[in-house]
Amino acid sequence: MKNTSVHFRNIEVNGLNLFYREAGAADAPTILLLHGYPTSSHMFRNLIPILSKKYHILAPDLPGFGYSDAPDHDRFKYTFDNLASTMQSFVDKLRMKRFAVYVFDYGAPVGYRLAMANPEKITGIISQNGNAYKEGLSKDWNPIQKYWQDASLVNRDALRDFVSKTATWYQYHAGVSDPSLIAPESYTLDQYFLDRPGNVEIQLDLLKDYRTNVALYPKFHNYFRTYRPRLLAVWGNKDPFFLPVGAEAYKKDLPDAIVKFYDTGHFALETNVTEISTDIMDFIVTLPK
């Protein structure tokens, strides 16, 4: 049996200590896993041992999340451009030449920036509830969009509950038919990091900057049409934030995109890792080397 041990590593990137998980043979095709809000590479803890039987897996924690450095928002610019720049340095420092990218939630705008900057490196894309189309944004984004339009302190303060224990619990449980499948350490660990001093300001800065992702959607679409990456969308169909229509929208620019829905919510890996991993393995074998 192949060794699927997960290694927990740290690397200095742009003056930051980044934590990442690595598994699988280093000479196997690589898959870069990019997490979203409010989680970390911990969200991939059940997926990595499955994929690493055949593939080389790298799963970093973004700055401000998980076990990576989270400098104060006055000392580090928490924008998606800057997160992508940090991940670019991570890719460069590890000398990653070719890889597929799995994007989820915040990981999607970070990953698509990487893909646009490195089209020759990308073998394929797996988007798990990683939105790139306006029609995919649900009404739950309305208070955040209000902050985009008017970045007043009142509108910023109105979003502070977004990082609360109740909100984190909701993100994991909304749309899930069997709550007993949600491991309590998932949202508990996320909340531990969210509750660190100063972290609420980091998250509010990123919520504000998310508007730049929506502004970039046309460029993402142009990248899809120009480079025609193979794409698999694996989507919890009861996600309260990113609607199923957002998954189907990929087919507008990538007619050959494969779209799979699962009867679950935003954190689909918590409940459907077996089905999702099977679909990913079937997809990855079709990608160019």
Image (cartoon, rainbow, N blue to C red):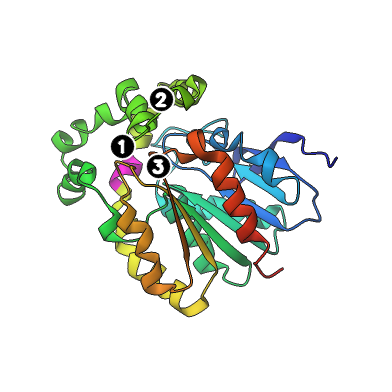
Instruction: Decide which of tag 1 and tag 2 comes sooner along the chain.
Output: 2
Q: What residue is shown with label 2?
A: 179
Q: Position of residue 32 (x, y in %)?
A: 62, 52
Tell me if 29 is positioned left or right of 68 in this view.
Answer: right
Q: What residue is shown with label 3?
A: 263
Q: Position of residue 176 (x, y in %)?
A: 37, 33
Q: Which residues are magenta?
A: 204-208
Q: Nearer the viewer, residue 76 or 212?
A: 212
Identified at 36% across, 62% down, the residue is 248
Query: Magenta stretch: residue 205 in it?
Result: yes
Q: What residue is shown with label 1?
A: 204
- Residue 265's label in the rendered image is none
**Residue 61 seen in render:** no
Instruction: Decide which of tag 3 and tag 1 comes sooner along the chain.
Output: 1
Considering the numbered disc 3 on the image, is that residue within a helix, a strand or a loop? loop
Q: Nearer the viewer, residue 286 or 70?
A: 286
Which is in the foreground here, disc 1 or disc 2?
2
Identified at 73% across, 35% down, the residue is 6
Identified at 39% across, 28% down, the residue is 199
Neighbourhood count class around disc 1 (C-alpha, 10 Å): few under 14, some 14–19, many 20 upward? many
- Residue 53 occupies which quadrant of the picture? top right
Question: Would you say the magenta stretch is mainly helix, strand or loop?
Answer: helix
Q: Residue furthest bottom?
A: 226
Disc 3 from disc 1: Cα separation: 30 Å
Q: Disc 1 marks which amino acid?
A: Leu
Q: Disc 3 marks which amino acid?
A: Asp
Identified at 33% across, 41% down, the residue is 205
Verify CB contact (< 8 Å) between mark 3 and mark 1. no
